[in-house]
Image (cartoon, helix red, strand yellow):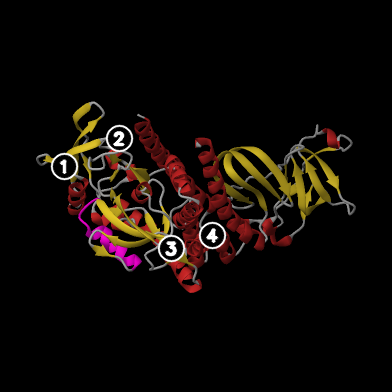
Amino acid sequence: MIVLYILLFILILAIVVCWHEYGHYFFAKKAGILVTEFAFGMGPKIVSKKKGETYWSIRAIPIGGFCAMSGEEEDGTELIKVGDQVKLVLDESGKVSKIIMKTDNPDYSDLETITVESVELFGKDMSPLSLNEYEVNRDAVIVYSKKEEMQIAPEERRFSSKTVWQRFFVVLGGPLNNIILAFVVFLLLGFITGIASNDPVIGDVSKNSGAELAGLSKNDKIIKIGSYEISSNDDIHEAVYGTDSRALEITYERKGTTDTKTVYAQYYLQNIGISSSLSYSDMEKLFITVESKNALIGTNKTRAKQDGLLENGDEITAYSYNEGEFIELTSWDQFYKVADEIDGGKIQFKYNRGELTDQLSGTYEVYSDDLLKSQGYESVIKQIGISAKTTIKFFPCILNGLKSFWKAATIIFSTLGKLLTSKEVGVNDLGGFITILNQTATYASGGFASLLYWIGLLSINLGIINLLPIPALDGGRIVFLFIEGITGKKINPKVEAWIINIVFYLLLGFMGYILIQDVIRLVIQIK
């Protein structure tokens, strides 16, 4: 399964990254810019095939990608210099169509080797291109080897020669494509998930949930929960939360027969990173799970796991809040109320693990209600593992898709705001590629709709992050173009490249640090 999840992770990354780069490619071609390579991944080439003017490549490291455009960086270097030894292939009109850089290339052994005495391949204002006394075609190719060649790029084919608006759309194309992909995905999800019916009939039962373990099934009609009479789906939610007990007596109707089952709810105490376990026969004891289903800020390994060093299956017996005295915990209902009342601060537990008793956990920070809400989470959740039947209604489904898109698009700003202003979270809470891999596995286990949501979430995040006004990101380049548009003058290409390169290496260092944090979390998980 691990190999399958890794392959799935690479596939999803390829979809999101390649679609981003295709946005750059599309507008570059529209502007007449020569695109030399379109690549998924970084590092050495594994596969590369030339189609038209562009090499389409897969590279060794399946992270990121790029769309290489001529004239994207002005470094002043020429592909061919005076004094080079070359061979020339002429077309029927006597113009140069190929320039052979390796004179020992056996495919061109019959051609004469010449020394470059003069060369002009820039062609400012559409002036002719030349090499020695020969005129050069504007789409001539420089051949380096049997497998590697590059088309020359005169002035009119270069990114740097295009108008501010043309360059703006080329740069914007990548993030714009990611936003469009996310928009389409969330609209599609609106129709896949449908609109919940208010009829109290079970549409689906979650795997390993309290409802499944009790024997409830799809199409069962809920009649009563404890003392609550049920006539609508809204009543179910009210009854589950309104009953001060984990054990719920649920009466239901199945094919004309009425029965009652005891269903144990699951408590998700998301502020302290602990949820109840249903894998033990004694449901009254506080056996726990310490891995969240979704990533908070960046990691799905909760602080109970990372800093508290608690494990799945530990039995909680007491807690200490803000370094106070330990208070005994005797039931999940009591624990749920405790978690619902606290807001931030520090917590520590006593627990049993197998034959080890009265062990002390690490002391760790509790997530505040404000932080959780900024990420779209509730502090505590009580669920029995059933969902309502759904129907497809065109406009309500569209509206749901738009709401999901807006929520996904805005939550990143809440995250960035908390990282910059809150003392509760910091860089150490961010996750890198290992976290993304873990999240891919989590969402994949939830089915196709869950995985599709993850693709939409990754795409919108990549699009918005790239629009941040940071040099080395698309947003930073848009800022440079904005300055040029206002002043009417290009920023010195060397200064721009210098700034971008410095920030690029700083970002690489930042990503490396996050990767180290990922590895540390992985080691803790393995231990």
Residue sitting at the far left: 325
Give the Cα distance between marks 4 and 2.
38 Å
Residue matched to label 4: 181
Disc 2 is placed on an element classified as loop
Q: How many marks overall?
A: 4
**Mark 3 vs 2: CB contact within 8 A:** no
- Whether residue 164 is in magenta: the answer is no
**Of the residues shown, which amino acid type is indicated by label 4?**
Leu
Tell me residue 79's x, y (percent).
69, 44
Residue sitting at the far bottom: 395
Disc with the residue nearer the chain's start (3 vs 4) = 4
Residue matched to label 2: 311
Q: Please name which of the two marks, 4 or 2, marks the residue nearer to the observer.
A: 2
Disc with the residue nearer the chain's start (2 vs 1) = 2
**Of the residues shown, which amino acid type is indicated by label 1?**
Leu
**Mark 2 vs 1: CB contact within 8 A:** no
Q: In this rendering, would 269 be left or right of 5?
A: left
Residue matched to label 1: 329
Magenta stretch, main secondary structure, is helix
Give the Cα distance between marks 3 and 2.
36 Å
Q: Which residues are magenta?
A: 232-246
Quarter of the image for the C terminus: give it: top left
Disc with the residue nearer the chain's start (3 vs 2) = 2
Q: Residues within 10 Å of mark 2 (few under 14, many from 20)?
A: some
Give the Cα distance between marks 1 and 4.
48 Å
**Of the residues shown, which amino acid type is indicated by label 3?**
Lys
